[in-house]
Image: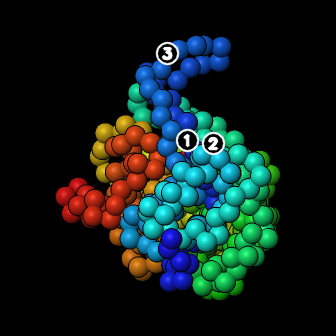
Amino acid sequence: MIKSNHIEIVVVGSLNMDLVVRSPHLPIPGETIIGNSFATYEGGKGFNQAIAARRAGGQVAFVGKVGRDGFGDRFVAALDREGISRDFVTRGKNSTGIGNVWVGEDGANKIIVVPGTNNEVTPEDVEAASELLASAWVLLLQLEIPIATCTRAAQLVRRGGGKVLLTAAPVPTQPLPSELFEAISLLLVNETEVRQMATLLGLPAFNEGQEVEAGRAILAQVGSSLEGIVITLGSKGALWLSTQQVEHIDSFKVKAIDTTAAGDTFTGALAVGLQRGLPVPELLRFANAAGALSVTREGAYPSIPFEAEIERLLANG
Ligand code: RIB
């Protein structure tokens, strides 16, 4: 098992076993259809981001919870296989979280998550990892574990001088606490989430196509603690937004087989690029290449590319 010294990137987040059904199209309410295939893949936004950061070349540690069940065993084995420190991955009372994933022929998905042990990750679990968090360069957070836990982790990393990247997914139903917002360095959202987050902050409604305006309004509302917002736009690329800078990069043209974990893969690679000090355009290209490769393959975990593949796409793509 990898020990948690020399860690650059810490993920405090979810581990969901993805139960994936592929079908020609996704059923509408009341409709029964025959699917093409079923498979289980290790996933969860936290786990996917950790794998993406590790495979892109980072030293990664995970803080989270799995059940005392076969799915939990699979996660422990996967973290060890990938060389991710799991000193702070413990077993909870419930079953391991699951993601019920439907994937249509065009690679688009619909996901319902049942959190299981992810809901048991407490601020106390984070306190137990306080030394690790205080020395982290980058913390990756998503919203599939309790928000109080995310807040504590973010505060510990910010206090230690590290950067906190929050993927605002699933978009919460209640506004995020100001303590969490104040501890975030970068907010990561897709084109829908940026508008939903603006609404949650009490800002006026933004229409499709107004992602930059929504992002700018969020930056102005949250204040200077938030360094920037990264908006992933699927096949339309990605945007970096700060008070001084707007950068857009196009996406790589790939055939989409399964888009599950594309955003997570982008984020994990972005954390590695940030830690390496890449300038914004290069950083976005590195992360975008990783995300693009992930959509060309099925599943979450198995679809996440290694550094050499990312470099190859960057050189040729
Ligand atoms: O972002 C993709 C992930 O969302 C899946 O792996 C699923 O488990 C949900 O967390």
Asked if the residue at label 2 sits under 8 Å from ligand 1, the reply is yes
Under mark 2, the amino acid is Ile
Res 203 seen here:
no
> In the image, residue 238 lies at what x, y percent?
44, 56
**Distance (Cα) linking label 3 and label 2:** 22 Å
Under mark 3, the amino acid is Ile
Classify residue 121 as left or right of residue 277: right
Task: Compare marks 2 and 1 and give the one earlier in the sequence.
Answer: 1
Q: Residues within 10 Å of mark 1 (few under 14, many from 20)?
A: many
Residue 130 to residue 142: above or below: below
Task: Compare marks 3 and 1 and give the one earlier in the sequence.
Answer: 1
Name the residue that disc number 1 marks. Answer: 18
Instruction: Give the SS element for disc 3.
Output: loop
> In the image, residue 40 lies at what x, y percent?
51, 38
> Which residue lies most toward the left here?
316
Q: Residues within 10 Å of mark 3 (few under 14, many from 20)?
A: few
> In the image, residue 39 lies at what x, y percent?
47, 34
Name the residue that disc number 3 marks. Answer: 34
Name the residue that disc number 2 marks. Answer: 98
Q: Nearer the viewer, residue 56 or 132?
A: 132
Residue 257 to residue 213: above or below: above
Q: Nearer the viewer, residue 262 or 186?
A: 262
